[in-house]
Amino acid sequence: MFSLKSFLLASCATALISSSAWAADPIKIGVIAEAQAVAGSSIAPAAQLAAEEINAKGGVDGRKIEIVVYDNHSSSAESVRAFQRAVSEDKVNAVIASYISEVVLALEPWAGRLKTLMITPGAASDVITQNIAKNYDQLKYTFHGYLTSTSLAGLVCDAAKDLLVEPYKMKTAVIMSEDAAWTTPLDAGYEKCLPDIGVKVVDHIRMSPDTTDFTPIFNKIEALKPDVMITGISHVGTQPTVQWKSQQVPIPMFGISSQATNSTFWKDTNGAVEGVMFNAVSGPGVAVTPKTLPFVDAYQKKFGNIPSYAGYTSYDEVYMIADAIHRAGGTDPDKMVEAMEATDYVGTIGRVAFKPKGDPNPHALRTGKGYITGLMLQWQGGKQVNVWPKELAAGTVTWPSFIKLKAASN
Amino acid sequence: MPAFVSSRLFWIGALTVIVALVLPTYVSGYVLGLLTVAYYTAVFAMSWDLLFGFAGEVNFGPTFLIGVGAYTAGILDAHYSPGLSIWICIAAGALAAVVGGVILALPALRVSGPYFGLTTLVAVLMLQNFIVVAAGLTGGEIGLAVPDVISIDAKTNYWIALGFMLVSGAILFGLSRSAIGLILQASGQDKIQAGALGFNVTKHKLAAFVVSAFFSGLAGALMVFYMGTASVSTFVDVGVGVQIIIAAVLGGRRTVIGAAIGAIFLIGMGELLRPLGELATLIVSVIALLVILFFPDGFLGIIRGGAKA
Amino acid sequence: MLFWQILIDGFAISALYALGATGFTLIFGVSGVLNLSHGAIMVGAAVAAWAAAGEFGTGPYMGALIGILAGLVLAFATYFIAVRPIQRSRAIAESEKEIFILTATLLWGIIIQEAIAYLFTNNAKTVLPIVEGVTTVFGVRTPRNEYFTAVICWVAIGLLWFLVNRTRRGKSVMAASMNPRGVTLLGIELSSIYLTVWAIYGLLAGVAGILLGMFLGVSSYSVGPLTASAFSIVVLGGLGSVSGSLIAAYVVGYLETGTAYLISPAYRTIPALLLLVVVMYLRPQGLFGRR
């Protein structure tokens, strides 16, 4: 709440300062995001921050960047309306849209129909880029600025190998994920990569995102006696985490838990999140690139909290769009697409480049060595501590008291 | 006096239609897009008003009919495009909604009051569960991406929505002023007496159900091909039904036209207040509550009150 | 083992449903009001307790007390803002009042929900539990908080039973639910009975909301489902019948828990909905409703 107010104040202040010092028309970037959701609430403020920084240095070729914010209330229909408004009424040149795959999938054809560059800072479904492969000419305006579910699954497996399989000799896992667009490819990815690191998947539980009582789910998982629960949750978060702790389920939670990336999550769960490990592209105090920490500091100073994962990507995306417009020599949509495809930019989460036309996932981020590798964070004593990869780790894995695990002595 | 009131209403109506007709020349595509959605919502609210405003039953199920129409049309298009014209999909959607209306009517007409309300609510929840469980067919929580749209031109969409609203509004209004409407109204006030007068109340209610379902389903199907996507949160969620009920009560129950005014007001206000962000829904709800508490006859009641004074 | 697990978990969740539905059905029995802001009042109480205990550091007991107080205040606000003006209105015909009260309480619920979302965001919140830790009974490891929830629910329901059957005030409430006009003939002000009932309702909804917040957590998204679930349970049991609601709460609670354990958590609510359809069709007045 406090962050929101300061955000509003900040936007008002910028509006007041803006004078006629700018040579040409401003570049407008629409931000369609979920202002009230944990992950979505950082998207607009982070974009605003990037725009102010760029403007303070003279803008793009003398043109000022303006961010136009739309709250979509997590609804596809409102997003479609906001997108139409952004393009036809507010004449934006590009759109940064949503962390929800469903929303991005609904907007993707509209980006094509209205020929407007769109990039998502947080949706994960592989279907977004698969669609582009199927119908490139129509859908090439969409870019996937966050990891695809398949890439995420791969990164989680990489981390599990180093953090769970080698030290603790874990052999079995249950996949627990919510029913949603982004988890279908994620689960398929888990099913494929876990056996590769020597972990057998003993069961696979998908639950409705409306679930409130997780007792039966945890009991069912516990009866299977797996070594670890591999999670794929985003719309739910607080409730499974709190019930995991209050029931003292003696199995670690490891994987994707989008809400856990947010700094307020400790308070929302009354500290129940202690020991939960989750994949992230950036973390507090982790200098993934030289740009990461200055961004987090500036964000915290301005808005009073730490950005969610989609905040980092949203911030980078404003820079990427600005760079693409500069290289394209203007805001012609087709030229902007070409320039975006040539992006090679070191942002807050690593080196960003998009897969080319012809790839099964065109316009998806490149991952792996040299590009984005991701992190594995763990909540410890009210703080998110990075535990993987080793060269960026700030601490080691610890377990809450109800999980009895000992590292193999060798 | 009644003649004066209705003539005043008539002039206001005519004026509104004229404004709606010349609007595309003056306003931007975005405003037209907004009104397109508002017009479809107006048809939802008018259909609700015909059946339930008149029959006096509390119905939480408008989105059952809308959802059946919208999803039938959307699924057909998603599976058979481009072999199947979207107009056939839309017709099939309307037809499916009528079938759904009859299926819902059979148990629903046996009960009344809160029990009727709950039966209709359960129908919505069942449909919602079905859509989520049968994700392979319906797109589930993700929503269904529909490959075709009617048009991407804002004006074309606006004309289609406006024409559709005017035609369905005229038919629904005519029905409400006909014998069916009067019998429904009588049965809403005193069921036993209406039955004693020799009217087959059930038959008329069933007829109203079918008409209401037809227009709800048709509007739902058209809206799918305007948005290019069908999702539970747009067409089926109980919250959408609540919006429709509020629109009808806000505009003035038992007027059909009031329902349309209420729907356009709700969507327009939501948009005007958008700069307030999260407070927009809160403020719209407060306004709606105040109108219901102080002007129980809704906007049309206010206009009529003005006429009397 | 599975049997005991379903028995214990189902018991706690059913007790919570029962407590939530009791107040709802009581109001209907006495004044014929279906209060559709029910879920919002429960969530409001839970969020108040969460904010007091967490944000302002009052500790769990004080937090719970503040939460109950919030439930009481919200219940009275509902009555005075969304119910009484319509009951007393002359502009609204008697036959119309039902739908007006439904619409008004619905809107009032949305107002509370949006206010919560504005002040405290939509993030799900959990109230700091009063009892922590787990115990193992019959080989089932259960949070102590779950037993605590069930006990408090039944204590509250027991107190209500005592109040209704053993005190003068309670007896007049009971009488009013059977025959409102008869009570006025006895010289008891109907409006003061209404106040008593709304106060009882506020306390019950407040306690239920806080327990829910400790046990499962709440968010402003829970408002709609909570109202719908109380509504279904109350209709299933027979509107206005408190004992019917209690039994219906257990039927629904066990049906859901059983489905979640034995079939799949994804299908949790479907059998209960099917049961509701069947009951509505065969016995529209509910399982224990009088007509």
Image: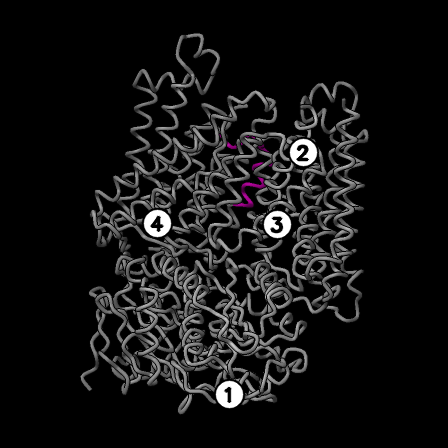
Looking at the rendered structure, whether the residues under marks 2 and 4 are on a common chain is answered as: no
Horizontal placement of A143 versus A241: left or right? Answer: right
Q: Amino acid at mark 2?
A: Leu
- Cα–Cα span, label 2 and label 4: 52 Å
Spot occupied by residue C153 in the image (x, y as percentages of width and height): 31, 38
Mark 4, residue position = C9
Name which residue lies at 64% across and 70% down.
A110
Q: Residue at x 75, y 68 (%)?
A: B80
Q: Which residues are magenta?
A: C273-288
**Mark 4: which secondary structure?**
helix
Image quadrant where residue B241 sits: top right
Instruction: Answer whether labels 2 and 4 touch (C-beta < 8 Å).
Output: no
User: What scheme was used to colour the molecule?
Assistant: one colour
Judged by depth in the image, the label closer to the viewer, 4 or 3, is 3
- Number of the front mark, 3 or 1: 3
What residue is pinned by disc 3? B268
Q: Are dots 3 and 1 in contact, CB under 8 Å?
A: no
Which image quarter is the N terminus of chain C in? bottom left
